[in-house]
Amino acid sequence: MGVVEVSYNITVPSGIVFNFTNMLGEGRLSKEEVEQALESAGRAADAAVAKLRETGFSKAHLSKDGTPEHVYFPRMPYIKEGNPNTEASIIKLLRYSKRLRHYDVVVFLGVGGSYLGNKVLFDCFGGCHWNANPTLRQGQPRIYFSGNNMDPVDCNGLVFEVQRLGKRYDQLGRPLRVMLVPISKSGTTLETISAFTYFYDVFSKDKDIELDCTVVTDLRADVEKAPLLQLAEKFGWEKFDIKEGIGGRFCVMTDPGLVTMAALGGDIEEFLRGAREMDTYCKQAELHENPALMNALLKFLAYGKGRDIEVFMPYSMHLKSLSEWYVQLLAESLGKRYDRNGELKHYGRTPIVAVGTTDMHAQTQQHQDGRLNKVVQFLEVANPVEEAIVHNPFPEFKLFAQYEGMDMRKNLRAALNANEGALTSDNRYNARFVLPKLNEYYLGQLMYFLMLSVAYEGELADVDAYDQPGVEVYKRLMKEQL
Ligand code: PA5
């Protein structure tokens, strides 16, 4: 008798698939334990997230100064007065998108949550050829990122590039129009503010550059303690708000992330629509059909069996920075010393950035043969918009014959299938997300799905997914040295 292959999938009406077949089976989770956990812990987590949606409060969550703090990320997709996105805030972003067409260069300055989501949007809807290719830009400005490190070489590289462009524009008879956009909720983050100050000083003295700034920060902050707000008020710069209840790693669907979508001329409404439909679906689905809850539960149960590393591996170069964004989301949200009752827990999976096929030649050896402590989370784009068919320019060489007609999309899929098959043949935990294609709508669905999964897992593990007390220790030590 042949082996009966069972497949476990959740398909969202939009076509996104979460295939978790390979989380179950020999040496992994059993269907029964998943069903049982879903009915008990899963149901409780679902109820807690429903309450979060309704009240904006998550059990025991406090701000850095020890006061109860709202968590409003589930409200981001809904454009409504009182929510992080309103009709007025979207209109303002659309106007800003048009305004930026009068600029040649935009430099976004931010770190952590004030950078990583923006970089995902840039890589998905701009990409590494954006700045060099006016056809791709269609009138939108060149876009650069800085302030995400304190590396002088990197800062000087950007100065060199912008000043080089300035000289070219000077020859064309006008200055280069540059917009600096510091993004910082606290308004005091060292990387962001030092880079902003450095660039402002250099560019404002350069006769080939016409400099302007936009500030993205918490507009409710005490002006006395908010350097960016002070400057914006003195110089009359445009301001965008980082709203109450929106933490850095959950902010990509509000102004601090959407300013980058605006600079790209991307479709903000589609991005939010994707998130909204994912939220509605997860909210209304039966427990076993809720992909975000199922994803959280399976990873939580796998953690209980020693799988404390998650390799996030899209098969797409454009999505590599999504892995980097996910690293922050997972690490800062779930890597916690204590649970919400103050008991020592040391919870959390260590996230690893990988991209297929590149890292099959670097990390896969460890995934396949190394310690049994990993879940490999694949991400596939089922129908990439672009194709590349290889033609053989060396017909006289026999060894090149096989390349004639080769379809890169097919190769990519074959590589993913092979990697998945190899891990599964050794009973190693892996799962696959499938996006029908990569556009604003599907990216909105996926990013929201991942945020929601983390919220569910915070409930399952009973840790506060919305604080990051562990970063205060190094901050204090660093301050002492400065
Ligand atoms: O998730 C977070 O809260 C952090 O990663 C912050 O986004 C990061 O430290 C930057 O902070 P700020 O926006 O205040 O400059």
Image: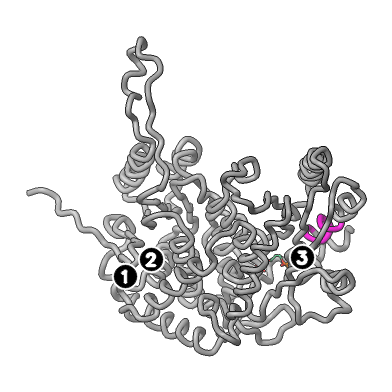
Q: Which is more N-terminal, label 2 or label 3?
A: 3
Which residue position holds label 1? 34
On screen, residue 187 versus residue 421, left or right, reads right
The reply to whether discs 3 and 1 touch (Cβ–Cβ < 8 Å) is no
Residue corresponding to mark 3: 214
Quarter of the image with the C terminus is bottom right
Tell me, yes or no, whether the highlighted magenta stretch contains residue 277.
no
Residue density around tag 3, few if under 14, some if 14–19, many if 20 or more, within 10 Å: many
Determine whether the residue tagged by mark 2 lies in a helix, strand or loop. helix
Q: Gap in Å between the C-alphas at discs 3 and 1?
A: 49 Å
Quarter of the view holding residue 386: top left
Color encoding of the figure: one colour
Picture quarter with ligand 1: bottom right
Q: Is mark 1 within 8 Å of ligand 1?
A: no
The correct choice, above or below, for 372 with respect to 239 in the image is: above
Residue in the image at 88% along x and 62% along y: 480
Viewer-proximal residue, 29 or 249?
249
Look at the image and give the residue range highlighted in magenta. Answer: 191-197
- Residue 42 rendering spot, x and y as whole percentages: 38, 78
Residue 296 appears in the picture as rendered: yes
Could you tell whether 126 is left or right of 441 in the image?
right
Kind of residue at badge 1: Val
Q: Nearer the viewer, residue 273 or 365?
A: 273
Residue 377 sits above or below residue 253 on the image: above
Between circles 3 and 2, the one closer to the viewer is 3
Give the residue number, with chain letter if any, for mark 2: 298
Instruction: Using a 10 Å C-alpha cutoff, classify the residue at mark 2 as few (fewer than 14 neighbours), some (14 to 19) or many (20 or more).
Output: many
Q: Secondary structure at mark 1?
A: helix
Q: Position of residue 121 (x, y in %)?
A: 57, 57
Furthest residue in direction left, as rendered: 1
**Residue 333 drawn at (x, y percent):** 58, 69
Helix, strand or loop: magenta stretch: helix
